[in-house]
Image (tube, coloured by chain):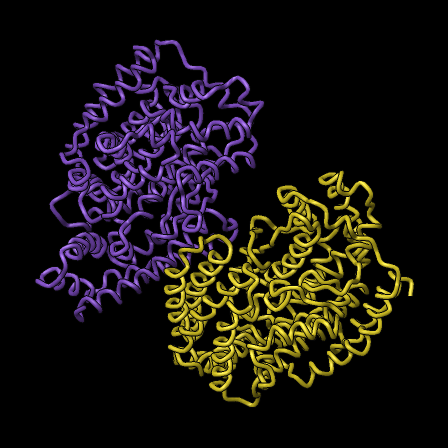
Chain colours: A purple, B yellow
């Protein structure tokens, strides 16, 4: 190993120590830490984030990376890793440190404030923080000098290669193909899913989560399931993946599907090749790529009939009274039921992209100046009426439902829908090599994970989403797989 | 505020940020983190500990502290804080940084190894780590150049002012006064406590913990109860106190008393005066002082009949079958039953100091060279035979039962017995101002906490243990209160 590489790796180790600190304190804060300790914690966390920022934006690190990229004897995979890291660090470096620390602190405050506002069902409590977050985000976009401008910068951050023009086309397709289908379904006989909303004691739900995680071969020595207000995944290292969920006593499937979803995220990081796992490319997959894996688990596998061949008997055993009138067939129809609904994370697969479309339109408006935060609640409610025909009864089930804007993750939402469409294409490719239904029915989930690892996960974030899709599927990204999948599946389910 | 003080406080803020990082990662590691992630985490935690060490031992900090101590316009309380901090930092500074980082890493590895060894019931797995820990601790004692030598240095670290000479006298008193009493009790009719070892489902035990914490007025917005292999308390800040316990399905009282014990620790930090809470003296109370508060909660209050006036009905409601034959009187007799036993943390109040005596004798031997780690299991077992008349059946219930040696906390154990004796004196003083039984019976636990806050807790670690006892009790430390308390209480219980 040459001296430059050694020096680079030493610096990366130091950076990773600060990342561990910041991530763990953040994770603790979102899952366990008592609320009155937050001021003390946030002040210090912001300082640590500043220290991390200083290490990441140190001139010497840029020199090292650039020289290593230029050297002939640098391994090609390492060059790719360095390329992605340089792009990331350059975006970071143009932001002044004081501004960066202030922004980190605002993110934490804003997120905690969002929690309070949601609990109190009062958008007014959150609006001033959101306003500050947007103002600071716009300032960051000004600092970022490059070819891209405004909202396109954020879109490209989360999904390299994407921009408003491409997303507009994608969402046009969704509007054109899916809205008519949803309307047809709305006028069809409805599926009875009332059993979902009976009382399901949480301690029993917890037992079920363990059964589900066992079935999907989750490595409990390298991961853990926690609780938080909003489910998320945090991969501290390849063998340390934290997933969270939120339990609701009157909903059988909400926490189950959020666990399957987050386990899909965790499994991506868990399966990154060893030599990539301790590099920048352990965790720089695009958001769309990451969402493709979580939604592949949640929808394409978790809502498949055969996923439940092994699990449904356990579910019935845990809840014999609640599920007395429910067989596996009725259960599967219910978890696939299409109903325009208020909450994105609980939306069915077919109306889900409309929730994203709404957020995408709002974000575009916030950044081109056509929407102001003070009007946001009304605009939100109007769009839910327009696209989903629903009246939003309160802020908690409307504008305050998602955590994302509270920490400034603008441009992230569109990747959810995009990821779902990637997943359709991955499923298509996987089905050429494997009998997916058979794997599920015969308790061979690990065969599916093996395919995903070999074709996708092992590379971490080494490739752009476009490249990664070509590697896994042997062809370019094509959203038609997604549209076809949804139309075929739901036409069949509703006998259309 | 003068510039020096400002500069000092800025540095202290930075130090506290690193302390937050190290503490949170450690806490996470002991409660939640999955085991396979430990190598990654430990390497980085050791690095962070090194960064913290560099800040703490920076020459400029010493200059600032010394100058502030010398200045006339420095507030007297701040001078005291600076005095204690200087003592602590000087002890740290004489250890070379590389050695310090290596030692931090060894502590973590050794602790994890102890867990494995305990789980596998095999002292041989742990012995090499213990040996390394002792060798490095002895090296640290060589680095420490001062009046004190060897084990006395460690004793003074945990309890300023204490040394082998004083502890020898203390333990002589225990040997002389308590051993005959224990023997008399062993020959008396035994109390029936068999109900304790029935099956108590853990989810119900958890409900009971919340009731106990509510009764003792635990602030759930400023603290949280977690699970870990070995119960402990970590106070991240005044309003962020983490306590842990370990549940056993076949033991009703083990987790309850560990929770009451840890809540006593947490309450100490929670009650430190605001102007002291963000200084070095938030958490530098001597170990004996801290243990005095945990054992005051656990034994002096928690085993009092009236503590259970409000709680026993709840306990019976949760476990109606298991406690069908048990009334409050029988329950109290059982939780105060004296039986020579193997496990320190589960020992009764009277035989408890003998467990400590054994550990004290062993530690003295390890540091004067008369005991080697390879012989430790046999020596341990021989002493349990000698003092408690017991045959140790396996390492997990013998030499491997405690976490303390695994992370090098030698000199800590003796403070447990000392703390119990401080607590007797505090109880004596408190009983002059308050009717303690009445406070317990009338659900006025907060009055007891108020007394403790005003006489002890508010000061944090501002005073030496000796000074603190005089402030709270109006007289010097006197172990006779402890001996008298134990003799009176247990002579009455056993009709001697």
The quadrant holding residue B394 is bottom right
Task: Return the residue nearer the eye: A65 or A470.
Answer: A470
The C terminus of chain A, quarter of image: top left
Give the residue drawn at x 23%, y 54%. Answer: A92
- Asked whether the viewer can see residue A472, the reply is yes
As drawn, is B210 to the left or to the right of A133?
right
Question: Does residue A56 appear left or right of residue B212 in this picture?
Answer: left
Residue A392 horizontal/vertical position (percent): 40, 23
The residue sitting at 76% across, 61% down in the picture is B300
Q: Residue furthest right?
A: B495
Q: Is residue A90 above or below residue A128?
A: below
On screen, residue A152 versus residue B184, left or right, reads left
| Residue A302 horizontal/vertical position (percent) | 37, 30
Between B325 and A168, the one nearer to me in the picture: B325
> Where is residue A412, by image quadrant?
top left
Give the answer, above or below, for where A6 lies relative to A183.
below
Q: Residue at x 67, y 50 (%)?
A: B217
Picture quarter containing residue A379? top left
């Amino acid at each position: 190993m040459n001296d430059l590489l050694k020096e680079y790796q030493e610096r990366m180790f130091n950076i990773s120590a600060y990342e561990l600190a910041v991530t763990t304190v953040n994770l603790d804060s979102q899952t366990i830490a008592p609320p009155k300790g937050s001021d003390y914690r946030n002040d210090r966390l912001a300082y640590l984030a500043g220290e991390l920022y200083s290490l990441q934006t140190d001139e010497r690190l840029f020199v090292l990376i650039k020289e290593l990229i230029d050297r002939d004897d640098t391994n090609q995979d390492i060059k790719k890793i360095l390329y992605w890291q340089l792009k990331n660090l350059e975006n970071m470096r143009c932001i002044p440190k004081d501004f960066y620390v202030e922004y980190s602190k605002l993110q934490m405050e804003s997120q905690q404030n969002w929690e309070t506002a949601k609990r109190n069902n009062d958008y007014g409590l959150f609006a001033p923080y959101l306003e500050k977050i947007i103002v600071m985000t716009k300032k960051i976009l000004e600092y970022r000098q490059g070819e891209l401008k405004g909202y396109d910068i954020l879109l490209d951050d989360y999904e390299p290669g994407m921009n408003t023009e491409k997303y507009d086309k994608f969402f046009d397709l969704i509007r054109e193909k899916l809205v008519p289908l949803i309307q047809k379904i709305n006028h069809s006989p409805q599926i009875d899913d009332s059993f979902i909303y009976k009382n399901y004691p949480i301690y029993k739900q917890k037992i079920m989560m363990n059964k589900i995680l066992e079935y999907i071969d989750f490595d409990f020595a390298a991961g853990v399931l926690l609780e938080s207000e909003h489910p998320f995944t945090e991969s501290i290292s390849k063998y340390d993946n934290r997933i969270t969920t939120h339990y609701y006593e009157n909903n059988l499937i909400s926490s189950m599907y959020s666990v399957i979803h987050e386990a899909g995220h965790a499994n991506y990081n868990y399966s990154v090749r060893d030599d990539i796992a301790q590099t920048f490319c352990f965790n720089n997959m695009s958001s769309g790529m990451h969402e493709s894996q979580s939604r592949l688990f949640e929808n394409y596998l978790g809502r498949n009939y055969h996923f439940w061949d092994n699990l449904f008997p356990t579910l019935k055993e845990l809840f014999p009274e609640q599920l007395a009138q429910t067989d596996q067939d009725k259960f599967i129809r219910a978890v696939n039921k299409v109903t325009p609904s208020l909450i994105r994370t609980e939306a069915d697969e077919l109306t889900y992209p409309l929730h994203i479309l709404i957020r995408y339109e709002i974000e575009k408006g916030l950044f081109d100046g056509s929407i102001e935060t003070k009007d946001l609640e009304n605009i939100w409610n109007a769009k839910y009426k327009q696209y989903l025909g629903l009246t939003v009864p309160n802020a908690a089930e409307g504008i305050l439902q998602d955590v994302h804007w509270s920490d400034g993750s603008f441009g992230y939402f569109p990747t959810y829908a995009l990821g779902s469409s990637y997943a359709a294409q991955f499923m298509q490719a996987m089905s050429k090599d494997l009998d997916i239904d058979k794997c599920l029915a015969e308790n061979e989930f690990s065969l599916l994970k093996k395919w995903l690892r070999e074709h996708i996960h092992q590379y971490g974030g080494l490739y752009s989403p476009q490249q990664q899709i070509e590697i896994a599927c042997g062809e370019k990204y094509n959203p038609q797989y997604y549209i076809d999948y949804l139309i075929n599946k739901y036409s069949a389910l509703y006998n259309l």
